[in-house]
Amino acid sequence: MLKDKLNADLKSAMLSRDKERVETLRGIKSAILYAEVDAGKREEGLSEDETLAVLKKESKKRQDSINLYTQGEQTERADKESSEKQLIDSYLPRQFGVEELDQRINEALAKLELKEITQRDIGKVIGYIKEKFGAQIDGSILIKLIKERMG
């Protein structure tokens, strides 16, 4: 389970005295704990998908910070956020690229028996792809590709 891996990696980082890794892993654990409390699941914990969603959110936060620090020409802070993001991303499943997403859209159109995507079909296509491939999908890229196909 993902939480077990995070705990084991935190223990390993503590033993090897890797301060940056310990700090980042503690931050991730804290975010997961906060999400558990917020969802009223402190005792049973989050599901694997919910935990992945927390990690994706944390990764996105780091990316936003990287962008802001880069714009403000604070490269040292941007580098720190970048290394944290890389660590967080190492726990996430590999994301589909544009070509793979295009293939998944084609598959969804065939399965849903749609010749083209209309405004009212967007939800069906996204729902099918997210249900089948969930954590491997970057929703913003998927929506962009679907809208491009609409014309």
Image (cartoon, helix red, strand yellow):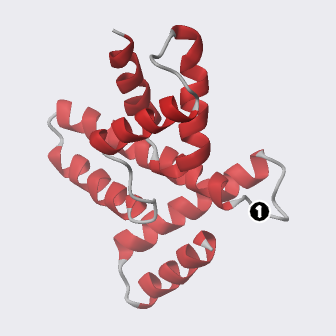
- Looking at the image, which residue is at 52% across and 21% down? 114
Mark 1: amino acid:
Gly
Q: In the displayed structure, does residue 83 sit left or right of residue 110?
A: left
Quarter location, residue 6: bottom right
Q: Is residue 12 left or right of residue 41?
A: left
Q: Where is residue 116? Give x, y as percent.
A: 45, 16
Q: Position of residue 125 (x, y in %)?
A: 54, 28
Circle 1 — which element?
Answer: loop
Side of 92 relative to 141 (left or right): right
User: Where is 93 relative to 11, above or below?
Assistant: above
Residue at horizontal 34 percent and vertical 42 percent from the top: 63
Reading the image, the residue beneath label 1 is 45
Of the pair 31 and 126, the residue shown nearer to us: 126
Q: Tell me the crowding category of disc 1: few under 14, some 14 to 19, or many 20 or more residues within 10 angstroms, Cα based.
A: some
Looking at the image, which residue is at 41% across and 23% down?
146
Q: Which residue, as the protein is rendered here, is positioned at the far bottom?
A: 15
- Count all numbered tags in the image, as a single digit: 1
Residue at 45%, 59% (x, y): give it.
92
**Quarter of the view holding residue 93:** bottom left
**Rendering coords of residue 2 (x, y %):** 58, 70
Q: Left or right: where does residue 25 sit relative to residue 30? A: left
Q: Give the quarter of the figure containing the N terminus.
A: bottom right
Q: Position of residue 47 (x, y in %)?
A: 71, 59
- Residue situated in front as seen by the camera: 132 or 55: 132
